[in-house]
């Protein structure tokens, strides 16, 4: 007592030692770094693969009447330019020339630029008598709708003309003569009655393709 007052002394504080972690327990306050990831690193964001846009292949009309009309007006256009076609019969839609007795030749679907280029060659060589023996009909490996490739019947006048106009003459791996006129290629193919010029209008970077000629194009 002090001067008649009772003074209670506080008990001394005890220092508490943290308990050791029990086996299998985790300290929830400890940050765990994911395995394989160090400080300053990050996981790259995956970018989904992209597919480059593709241009659907050009196909001839599926309606028989439209198909026939396209063939007929293309033949008329070629005729005006002095270019003939070896077969009056054209292949029915979806049929290969190999399936038709006596064969058939199609020109419907040739690119407009192909027709115009052939016209310039025909008009530049009035004695050449250019006749298409292979066009867009099915059954060829390199021909087709929208592709600037045709076969032209061989004759000496055409040979002399392309020989004179060629910027370069070479041979392919088959030993066939190749005449290059600007971006166009004339290959002297075949023998005998099958001898012809395999003509590609425009080369490199898909230049040998183009929008097919339509009846409206010539209106």
Image (cartoon, rainbow, N blue to C red):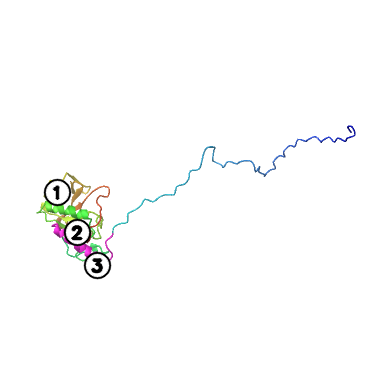
Q: CA distance from mark 2 to mark 3?
A: 19 Å
Q: Earlier in the sequence, mark 3 or mark 1?
A: 3
Q: Give SS at disc 2.
A: helix
Q: Are marks 3 and 1 in contact (CB under 8 Å)?
A: no
Q: Give SS at disc 1.
A: helix
- Give 203 or 113, whichever is nearer the viewer: 113
Give coordinates of residue 108: x percent, y percent: 22, 60
Q: Give SS at disc 3.
A: helix
Instruction: State the residue position of label 2.
Output: 218
What residue is drawn where x is 18% and y is 54%?
116
In this view, 141 is above or below 66: above
Labelled disc at residue 41:
none
Q: Earlier in the sequence, mark 1 or mark 2?
A: 1
**Secondary structure mainly formed by the magenta segment:** helix
Instruction: State the residue position of label 1.
Output: 162
What residue is drawn where x is 27% and y is 66%?
63
Please report the bounds of the magenta region as a residue range: 59-84
Give coordinates of residue 30: x percent, y percent: 63, 40
Q: Where's the N terminus, which quadrant?
A: top right
Q: Residue furthest left?
A: 127
Instruction: State the residue position of label 3.
Output: 65
Give coordinates of residue 95: x percent, y percent: 26, 64
Q: Quadrant of residue 73?
A: bottom left
Residue 199 in view here: yes
């Amino acid at each position: 007592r002090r001067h008649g007052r009772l003074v209670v002394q506080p008990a001394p504080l005890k220092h508490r030692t943290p308990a050791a972690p029990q086996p299998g327990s985790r300290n929830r306050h400890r940050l765990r770094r994911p395995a394989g990831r160090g400080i300053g690193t990050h996981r790259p964001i995956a970018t989904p693969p992209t597919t480059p846009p593709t241009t659907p292949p050009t196909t001839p009309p599926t309606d028989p009447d439209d198909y026939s009309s396209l063939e007929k007006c293309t033949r008329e256009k070629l005729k005006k330019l002095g270019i003939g076609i070896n077969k009056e019969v054209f292949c029915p839609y979806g049929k290969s020339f190999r399936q038709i007795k006596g064969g058939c030749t199609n020109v419907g679907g040739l690119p407009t630029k192909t027709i115009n280029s052939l016209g310039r060659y025909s008009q530049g060589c009035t004695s050449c008598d250019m006749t298409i023996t292979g066009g867009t009909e099915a059954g060829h490996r390199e021909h087709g709708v929208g592709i600037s490739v045709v076969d032209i019947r061989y004759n000496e006048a055409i040979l002399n003309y392309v020989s004179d106009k060629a910027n370069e003459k070479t041979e392919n791996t088959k030993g066939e003569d190749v005449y290059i006129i600007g971006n166009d290629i004339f290959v002297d193919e075949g023998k005998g009655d099958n001898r012809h010029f395999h003509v590609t209008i425009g080369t490199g970077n898909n230049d040998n393709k183009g929008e097919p000629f339509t009846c409206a194009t010539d209106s």
